[in-house]
Image: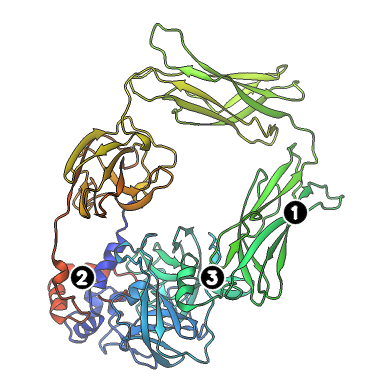
């Protein structure tokens, strides 16, 4: 999604004090059944050290023995209640005798020594609270939220075994086991808000992004997290062992009912940070020194066989160096010309090297079919993880599956006229040409498929190529023409790349499977700052530049600004005249812009300084603005792009930033009653409560 509104509702909630909510409900100023959505009523609870729920006696909500399609449990003894000074509002998991993993929004504003963790009937005070250094509460629900935190307890928890963190890569379809103390209920009616009872449920993963695990609450056969589950664990099971793969962060639906989209913070994405604080090496870490993993094809030649023949399989061996006292979970991906499920049996993406073993084998089992195919490859590649290092030479291996059917023709392609050009009316057309050739029999026709790529646009810069060519019976080759289309745009020389596409009735020449024709432009003007190398110079400390990106193109290696794809970028460069804060803005531009500022001397070595999509999306300001802390003499590279394919006139302004003195004001406390009274003066603020997703902590 381009904009994430769920994070905005979460931010409204974090400004409220839980103690004040309790007082308001108990004083009768808000009727739970009428004014609050149930999860909000149940946010106004306090947990005693024994774990009992203290609800206002007039609450009309009954305690359910079921989570949102989950089950009350006494298992998972390492999972407990998180809070501050006795008020519990989130869930956490013991990952080491003195360390508890939870969500950053559950720890935000909690003092180093005022946090509490209640587990096994006993409460422990914190010695220190660690929020992830890049936590961004305004970005909850996106990859940039970094919604993860650690409580360091003032004393060791004894008698409870900590849970290991997962260091592999979660997979779509993998089953999550959700545990937490949040509100119960079912998917049809939503959460009933009975916070404080530990429940467990399961749901499959629907999406894995850079730092998040997400799922859609589709039906009542699945479970979902609810208010109070924030910070709690989502386990995956590998080799019979449960690992913490996610930390509950939030969701979109206010009542967690069917249709909700929920998300957890990926633990493996923060494994190094967790280890740096808690020193844990679980999840297959195998000791303080990480193992180095390698993979080799110990039997690289497999083949299709009939039912009467002995199966001819291939084998990979995955090996680790170092200690073998703990199991190690290994993540893999597969590629190659062979198709999983049709050319060979499915292979696992997560493999466990058991404790006491230094290696494990994987078998590639070919599937016989009646298709005439060339030999096809199966490439297994080890995936990076915080649990191990990768052998720089042996991180991928290939098994080849030989076909047992007829010999296939081999197809090749070459550019027999590699240079084409735009021509005006009355001039002789200057076309390019490819030749597609086959080996073997020419008794019948053969249709060959190809894909089209390159800087030139199919159907715009040249007459559309349809993606296939038929070599007629009796002939061994056929030609494909590239007919340029003349236009008034200044484009420079552009490429048309044809790549032969794999099909089951022919094989592709390994060295001649792609060919390129270039189209020369017939305009003489040139854009001055389309490519990074041609960026325009800005001088001074207050400067306004103009331009446009209507005919600009995307250069290979260019970054996407703020995660937004754009295809029409232009560049400026500026060397800071002084050390200080400077604001750059595209205000006054005629289209929806994106703006990025970097350091670095080439398009492939850029380091991000600041980026922005919209200066104020809510107010309809779709131009962009950033403020940077510039260092005198440092060269900054400035990229302006359009949202997706937007283009138009550009106004780029650079000025010293205005000075503010807000830092001199005393910081507000979590329990500033006057501020809280002010917040609750109008019912409009209840929107933040009604849409609160997961009991985040107060400021």
Q: Earlier in the sequence, mark 1 or mark 3?
A: 3
Q: Is 269 placed left or right of 310 in the picture?
A: left
Question: On screen, 673 above or below 398?
Answer: below
Q: How far apart are the alpha carbons under marks 3 and 2?
A: 38 Å
Which tag is nearer the camera, tag 3 or tag 2? 3
The residue indicated by pointer 2 is 686
Q: How far apart are the alpha carbons under marks 1 and 2?
A: 59 Å
Residue 475 % position (x, y): 70, 17
Which tag is nearer the camera, tag 1 or tag 3? 3
Q: Is 524 placed left or right of 650 in the picture?
A: right
Give SS at disc 3: loop
Disc 3 to disc 2: CB gap under 8 Å: no
Q: Nearer the viewer, residue 122 or 342?
A: 122
Q: Nearer the viewer, residue 334 or 549?
A: 549
The residue indicated by pointer 3 is 166
Q: How far apart are the alpha carbons under marks 1 and 3?
A: 29 Å
Residue in view at x 73 percent, y 46 percent: 400
Residue 163 % position (x, y): 53, 79
Give SS at disc 2: helix
Disc marking residue 222: none
Residue 634 % position (x, y): 29, 49
Q: Nearer the viewer, residue 68 or 674?
A: 674
User: In the picture, which quadrant includes the C terminus?
Assistant: bottom left
The residue indicated by pointer 1 is 365
């Amino acid at each position: 999604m381009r904009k994430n509104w769920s994070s905005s509702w979460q931010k409204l909630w974090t400004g409220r004090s839980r103690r004040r909510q309790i007082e308001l409900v108990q004083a009768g100023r808000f009727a739970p059944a009428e004014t609050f959505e149930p999860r909000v009523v149940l946010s106004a609870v306090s947990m005693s050290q024994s774990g009992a729920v203290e609800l206002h006696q007039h609450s009309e909500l009954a305690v359910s023995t079921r989570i949102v399609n989950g089950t009350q449990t006494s298992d998972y003894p390492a999972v407990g209640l998180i809070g501050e000074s006795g008020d519990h509002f989130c869930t956490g998991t013991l990952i080491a005798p003195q360390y508890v993993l939870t969500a950053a929004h559950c720890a935000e504003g909690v003092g180093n020594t005022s946090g509490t963790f209640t587990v096994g009937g006993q409460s422990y005070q914190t010695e220190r609270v660690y929020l992830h250094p890049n936590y961004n509460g305004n970005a909850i629900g996106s990859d940039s939220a970094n919604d993860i935190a650690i409580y360091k307890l003032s004393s060791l928890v004894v008698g409870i075994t900590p849970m290991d963190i997962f260091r592999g890569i979660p997979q779509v379809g993998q089953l999550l086991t959700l545990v937490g103390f949040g509100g119960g209920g079912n998917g049809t009616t939503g959460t009933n808000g009975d916070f404080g009872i530990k429940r467990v449920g399961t749901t499959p993963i629907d999406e894995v992004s850079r730092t998040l695990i997400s799922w859609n609450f589709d039906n009542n056969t699945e479970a979902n997290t609810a208010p109070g589950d924030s910070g709690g664990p989502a386990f995956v099971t590998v080799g019979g062992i449960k690992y913490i793969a996610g930390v509950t962060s939030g969701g979109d639906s206010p009542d967690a009912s069917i249709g909700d989209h929920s998300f957890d913070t990926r633990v493996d994405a923060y494994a190094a940070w967790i280890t740096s604080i808690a020193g844990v090496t679980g999840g297959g870490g195998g000791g303080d020194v990480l193992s180095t993993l390698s993979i080799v094809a110990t039997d690289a030649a497999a083949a299709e066989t009939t039912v009467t023949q002995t199966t001819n399989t291939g084998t990979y061996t995955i090996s680790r160096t170092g200690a073998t006292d703990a199991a190690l979970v290994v993540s893999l991906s597969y590629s190659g010309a062979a198709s999983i499920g049709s050319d060979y049996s499915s292979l696992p993406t997560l493999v466990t090297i058991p404790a006491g073993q230094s290696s494990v084998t994987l078998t590639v089992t070919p599937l016989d079919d009646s298709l005439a195919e060339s030999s096809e490859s199966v490439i297994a590649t080890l995936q990076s993880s915080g649990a191990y290092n990768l052998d720089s030479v042996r991180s991928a291996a290939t098994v080849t599956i030989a076909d047992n059917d007829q010999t296939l023709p081999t197809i090749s392609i070459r550019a027999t006229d590699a240079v084409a050009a735009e021509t005006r009316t009355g001039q002789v057309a200057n076309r390019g040409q490819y030749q597609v050739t086959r080996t073997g029999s020419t008794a019948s026709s053969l249709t060959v498929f190809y894909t089209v790529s390159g800087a030139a646009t199919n159907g715009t810069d040249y007459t559309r190529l349809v993606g296939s060519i038929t070599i007629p019976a009796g002939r061994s080759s056929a030609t494909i023409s590239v007919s340029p289309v003349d236009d008034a745009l200044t484009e420079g020389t552009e490429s048309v790349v044809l790549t032969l596409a794999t099909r089951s009735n022919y094989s592709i020449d390994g060295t001649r499977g792609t060919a390129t024709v270039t189209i020369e432009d017939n305009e003489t003007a040139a854009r001055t700052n389309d490519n990074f190398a041609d960026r325009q110079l800005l001088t001074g400390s207050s400067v306004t530049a103009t331009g446009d990106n209507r005919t600009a193109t995307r250069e290979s290696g260019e970054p996407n600004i703020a995660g937004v794809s754009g295809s029409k970028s232009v560049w400026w460069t500026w060397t800071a005249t002084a050390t200080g804060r400077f604001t750059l803005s595209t205000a006054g531009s005629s289209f929806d812009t994106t703006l990025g500022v970097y350091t670095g001397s080439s398009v492939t070595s850029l380091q991000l300084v600041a980026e922005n999509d919209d200066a104020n999306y809510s107010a309809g300001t779709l131009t962009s603005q950033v403020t940077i802390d510039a260092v005198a003499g440092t060269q900054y590279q400035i990229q302006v792009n359009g949202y997706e394919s937007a283009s138009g006139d550009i106004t780029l302004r650079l000025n010293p930033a205005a000075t503010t003195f807000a830092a001199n004001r005393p910081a507000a406390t979590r329990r500033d009653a006057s501020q809280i009274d002010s917040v609750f003066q109008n019912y409009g603020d209840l929107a933040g409560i009604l849409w609160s997703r997961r009991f985040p902590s107060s400021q």
